[in-house]
């Protein structure tokens, strides 16, 4: 025994009948854009996107210059700090301390006692 | 109806020509963009990407001021002033400004240097300070530029010069700590690779940027105490002036840790002016690099061997005839007259060679046989570390030499070794060995490093002393050695010490070998001693020498020890006993 399938012919009711609250008229714009207009629009969009990219890149580069400026300031301050540390070390060096007026005015203790 | 061009018409020819030209363009573009793609990308990268080296800062070297680290070697940025003679516009103004601001740093014949138009780079001055460079920069002189250079500066001048060493013009550490720890001090340069603008300013655009920060060198803290070092150098300089000795070295060590507290050598130099030194031997740290026959200071160690092996006691006696025979050689005393039955303490007090040879003989049941020599070698070489590099962190440490016990003629050699001749040792080896002999028998590796300071320049990470061996001698032996050395000093020099403190020491006067013969006309004076309160707190070894000079331990080296020792008692705030 064999079965044969036949294509089921089904048609939606929506297709055949308009129901309530459904538009029965579709809006079609009367303005038609041609190929040239589409091309121009796409070109404009690409240009806008390009401008956005260039603006962002320029802004990032601007930050780079700011960062470079701050780096230079940090380097200059570090050099200054280093110079001051060297100066401080020189001023507190033993030889300088021994030659100072304070050291020269010191005297040897006559006697030393120890706390037991 | 089908439209077609007529064959051979001008339109067909033109079309074909255009097609051919376009094909040519396409082929060329294919070659440039596809085949040569990588080459041109590389060229573009090379043009846009600039690798910039971020120089690492060389680590600083600190000394101790009590227990606080203070900077002994620092870095400072100085500037090299250069000109581009082609770009220079107002020569008179340039000369006027730079002479006024940096007259002492300028090269001679500036006029001629600025007139050289065949070069674009002429150095006009070196080592200008930041302040000088800023003043000149403000004048906006055309054709004038600066190059920043980092250089080592030494706030304490020539203090501990041989311990520090110096950094040469290529930035490489030479001698001392700078040479031995160059790898740790130098750090590692960083790398900044990025797209730059025409002025060379790095930009963040681009995807292949590299920012690898520099790793600065380690900041090393020396165990050298700047106050002890300064005092040691002062005392040594004054003593050499007084005695006329040409060379002298002093080492001050903490016997409880092996840390070197001071290490001084004369003549010396200033590391900042190392290029002015005429005689390169001034760079050598004789305390670690020059082995010599230390003489009678070694008797303290011979006594330690005898005590530790039970061969003698301080009150053991022997018959002194001022001479003793070993093999076919006769060995005599430098100090005569202490003949008869005398104690080992007396032999040490009067530094009698016969007493030390007797100890060596007693180690071998009456003769310096193989067994005695083995024992002496084991103690001198293996336990006390004589004739072996100690591993101190300084460049050029000498090994010295101690004869092995089995060589022909070793009996005589070992007899002389018992009183410090016939073997070459460094002061570092002797001071470390003596420290072990008096501190309870613990041998600490001699070190000049106390730790490191973090990059933040605040945290001091102190390193622990390294114990090499704990059983160099028994604690009882160590105590007995201390007492004998204390008595030896007390007998002749005790009145020079501060009352209430334990200060012991031993003199040494060693003959020198000239033309294969020991001579008395040129001797080296040494002194080895310790001081402290309830335990030894410092060991000081002194050596003075001079070509053609007869220098004695008791006369020329001992006063240096005494001056430093008495000062150390105050500096360490030691309290008197009793």
Image (cartoon, coloured by chain):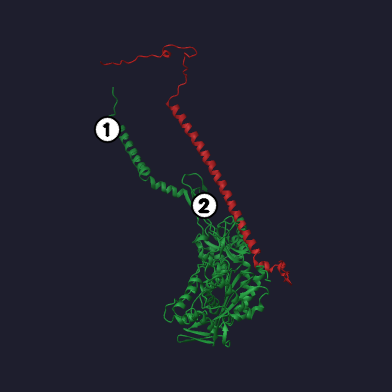
Chain colours: A red, B green
In percent of the image, x 45 and y 27: which residue is there?
A37
Image disc number at residue B45: none
Q: Quadrant of residue A36?
A: top left
- Circle 2 sits in a helix, a strand or a loop, which is it? loop
What chain does badge 2 belong to? B
Residue furthest left in the image: A1
Task: Report x, y in % for residue B135.
Answer: 62, 58
Q: Give me the C-alpha separation between circle 1 and circle 2.
A: 71 Å
Tell me the residue that label 2 is attached to.
B213
Please report whichever mark, 1 or 2, sits nearer to the chain's N-terminal start: 1
Tell me the residue that label 1 is attached to.
B8
Q: Is residue B357 above or below residue B273?
A: below
Q: Nearer the viewer, residue B521 or B410?
A: B410
Q: Is residue A98 left or right of residue B294?
A: right
Task: Report x, y in % for residue B453.
Answer: 58, 58
Residue B173 visible within the image: no
Give the mark toward the camera: 1 or 2: 2
Task: Report x, y in % for residue A61.
Answer: 53, 44
Crowd rating for badge 2 (residues with CA inside 10 Å; few <14, some 14–19, many 20+): some
Q: Is residue B196 left or right of residue B459?
A: left
Crowd rating for badge 1 (residues with CA inside 10 Å; few <14, some 14–19, many 20+): few
Query: On the rendered image, what quadrant is the N terminus of chain B found in?
Result: top left
Residue A76 visible within the image: yes
Task: Report x, y in % for residue B44.
Answer: 43, 47
Q: Quick check: marks 1 and 2 in contact, CB under 8 Å?
A: no
Q: Nearer the viewer, residue B558 or B263?
A: B558
- Circle 1 sits in a helix, a strand or a loop, which is it? loop
Query: On the rendered image, what quadrant is the C terminus of chain B found in?
Result: bottom right
């Amino acid at each position: 025994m064999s079965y044969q399938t036949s294509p089921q012919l089904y048609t939606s009711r929506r297709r055949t009948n308009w129901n309530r609250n459904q538009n029965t008229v579709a809006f079609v714009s009367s303005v038609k854009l041609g190929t040239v207009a589409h091309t121009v629009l796409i070109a404009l969009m690409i240009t806008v996107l390009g401008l956005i990219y260039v603006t962002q890149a320029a802004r990032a580069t601007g930050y780079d210059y700011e960062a470079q400026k701050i780096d230079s300031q940090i380097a200059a301050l570090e050099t200054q700090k280093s110079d001051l540390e060297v100066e401080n070390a020189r001023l507190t060096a033993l030889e300088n301390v021994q030659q100072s007026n304070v050291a020269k005015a010191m005297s040897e203790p006559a006697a030393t006692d120890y706390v037991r | 109806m089908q439209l077609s061009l007529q064959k051979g018409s001008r339109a067909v020819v033109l079309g074909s020509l255009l097609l051919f030209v376009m094909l040519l363009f396409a082929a060329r573009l294919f070659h440039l963009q596809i085949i040569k793609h990588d080459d041109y990308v590389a060229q573009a990268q090379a043009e846009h990407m600039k690798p910039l080296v971020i120089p690492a800062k060389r680590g600083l070297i600190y000394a101790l001021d009590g227990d606080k680290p203070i900077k002994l070697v620092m870095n400072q940025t100085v500037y090299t002033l250069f000109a581009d003679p082609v770009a220079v516009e107002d020569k008179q103004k340039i000369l006027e400004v730079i002479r006024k601001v940096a007259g002492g740093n300028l090269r001679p014949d500036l006029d001629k240097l600025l007139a050289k138009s065949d070069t674009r780079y002429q150095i006009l001055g070196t080592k200008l300070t930041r302040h000088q460079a800023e003043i000149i920069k403000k004048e906006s002189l055309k054709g004038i530029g600066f190059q920043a250079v980092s250089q080592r500066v030494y706030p304490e001048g020539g203090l501990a010069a041989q311990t520090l060493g110096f950094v040469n013009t290529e930035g490489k550490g030479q001698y001392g700590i700078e040479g031995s720890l160059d790898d740790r001090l130098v750090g590692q340069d960083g790398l900044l690779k990025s797209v730059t603008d025409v002025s060379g300013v790095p930009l963040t655009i681009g995807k292949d940027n590299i920012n690898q920060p520099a790793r600065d060198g380690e900041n090393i803290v020396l165990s050298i105490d700047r106050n002890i070092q300064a005092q040691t150098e002062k005392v040594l300089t004054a003593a050499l002036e007084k005695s006329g000795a040409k060379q002298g070295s002093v080492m001050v060590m903490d016997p409880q840790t092996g840390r070197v507290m001071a290490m001084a050598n004369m003549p010396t130099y200033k590391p900042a002016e190392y290029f002015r030194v005429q005689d390169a031997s001034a760079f050598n740290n004789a305390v670690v690099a020059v082995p010599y026959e230390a003489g009678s200071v070694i008797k303290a160690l011979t006594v330690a061997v005898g005590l530790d092996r039970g061969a003698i006691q301080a009150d053991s006696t022997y018959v002194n005839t001022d001479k003793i025979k070993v093999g076919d050689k006769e060995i005599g005393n430098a100090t005569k007259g202490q003949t008869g039955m005398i104690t080992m303490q007396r032999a040490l007090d009067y530094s009698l060679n016969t007493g030390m040879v007797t100890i060596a003989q007693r180690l071998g049941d009456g003769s310096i046989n193989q067994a005695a020599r083995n024992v002496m070698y084991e103690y001198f070489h293996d336990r006390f570390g004589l004739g072996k590099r100690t591993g101190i962190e300084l460049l050029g440490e000498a090994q010295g030499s101690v004869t092995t016990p089995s060589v022909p003629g070793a009996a005589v050699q070992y007899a002389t070794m018992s009183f410090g001749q016939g073997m070459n040792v460094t002061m570092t080896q002797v001071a470390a060995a003596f420290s072990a002999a008096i501190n309870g028998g613990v041998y600490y590796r001699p070190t000049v490093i106390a730790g490191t300071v973090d990059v933040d320049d605040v945290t001091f990470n102190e390193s622990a002393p390294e114990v090499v061996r704990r059983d160099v001698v028994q604690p009882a032996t160590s105590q007995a050695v201390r007492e004998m050395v204390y008595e030896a000093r007390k007998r002749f020099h005790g009145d020079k010490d501060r009352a209430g403190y334990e200060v012991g020491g031993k003199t040494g006067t060693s003959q020198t070998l000239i033309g294969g013969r020991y001579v008395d006309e040129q001797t080296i004076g040494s002194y080895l001693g310790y001081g402290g309160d309830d335990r030894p707190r410092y060991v000081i070894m002194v050596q003075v020498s001079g070509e053609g000079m007869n220098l004695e331990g008791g006369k020329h080296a001992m006063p240096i020890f005494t001056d430093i020792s008495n000062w150390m008692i105050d500096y360490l705030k030691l309290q008197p006993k009793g």
